[in-house]
Amino acid sequence: MSSFNTFKIIAIDGGAAVGKSSTSKGLAERLGLMHVDTGSHYRTLTSAILSSGEDAEEREAISKILDALKLSTQIDGRTAKLGINDRVPADSDLRSPEVNAQVSKFAAIPEVRKKLFAYQRSLADLAREQQYAGLIMEGRDIGSIIFPEAAYRFYLDADEATRAARRAKEGQTDPIAARDRMDSTRQAAPLVCPRGATQINTAHHTLEEVIEKITHLIGS
Ligand code: DC
């Protein structure tokens, strides 16, 4: 079978506001892939836990809430979105200042990550069933933990000023430096550059250049 016909798994990792989503969506469009933003999964669980009034210290209560949540998937364009009890939350709810401020705390809880691990891996089967050419998944631990076997792994980075300017342009209040610190120093699945991943500094390139570079590297 030629590489053109082989189902591709592409892992895109990196800190907050480094350009993972724009790059992943652009590549999904260009290469016919299913796109998954795992940051939104952590945001969805964070929002569900916060709306039941618990904070990140209440581990037992959080476990009970997680047990009761039924995960589902809704496909919107090329993006597979996580639903809770068959409802996909609005993007504005997932990117509220409160969720931005709390999501790293909840993402550091092993039970929260455990709730998502098998679900995230199962999305490769869904993408195959739906006859996508592959899956592009973005996050913090995709090339290291979720799909360590992914043939294509990329780690995006950019300087802090560029990233802060991107969030400000989107009109978001988002403590990106603090989130990165928590995400990369936690015990469970910390943000790392996966072994063998290609590093790309997105501050030095336009979005189109980054998409072109990755397309070239994966040989499509
Ligand atoms: O990509 P994002 O900024 O929307 O992600 C929100 C948070 O979710 C991020 O600060 C840490 C967490 N996250 C994670 O722990 N693991 C992932 N694979 C993706 C996101």
Image: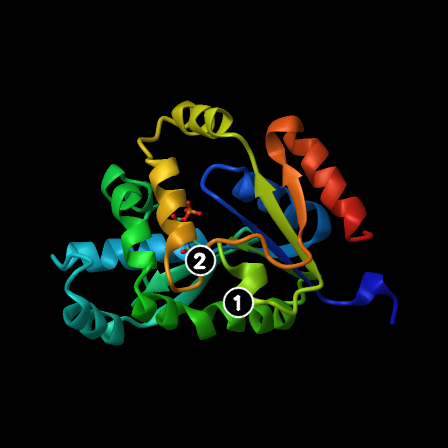
Specify the quadrant of the image occupied by residue 212: top right
* Residue closer to the observer: 160 or 70: 160
Q: Tell me which residue sits at (27%, 71%) in the image.
A: 69
Q: Tell me which residue sits at (38%, 45%) in the image.
A: 181
The numbered mark at residue 187 is none
Mark 1 or mark 2, which is nearer the start of the sequence? 1
Q: Which residue in the structure is indicated by mark 2?
A: 190
Does the numbered disc 1 mark a residue whose Cβ is under 8 Å from ligand 1? yes
Give the x, y percent position of residue 50. 18, 54
Q: Is residue 89 visible?
A: no
- Horizontally, is 123 left or right of 90 in the view? right
Q: Secondary structure at mark 1?
A: helix
- The type of residue carrying mark 1 is Ile
- Horizontally, is 7 left or right of 42 in the view? right
Q: Seen from this angle, which residue lies furthest left?
A: 53
Q: Secondary structure at mark 2?
A: loop
Specify the quadrant of the image occupied by residue 195: bottom right
Give the x, y percent position of residue 89. 32, 52
Q: Tell me which residue sits at (16%, 56%) in the image.
A: 55
Q: Seen from this angle, which residue lies furthest right?
A: 2
Q: Tell me which residue sits at (41%, 29%) in the image.
A: 167
- Horizontally, is 18 left or right of 91 in the view? right
Distance between the Cα atoms at labels 2 and 1?
A: 12 Å
Give the x, y percent position of residue 121. 52, 71
* Nearer the camera: disc 2 or disc 1: 2
Q: Which residue in the structure is indicated by mark 1?
A: 146
Say few, some or many: other residues with alpha carbon within 10 Å of mark 1 (under 14 / 14 to 19 / 20 or more). Answer: many
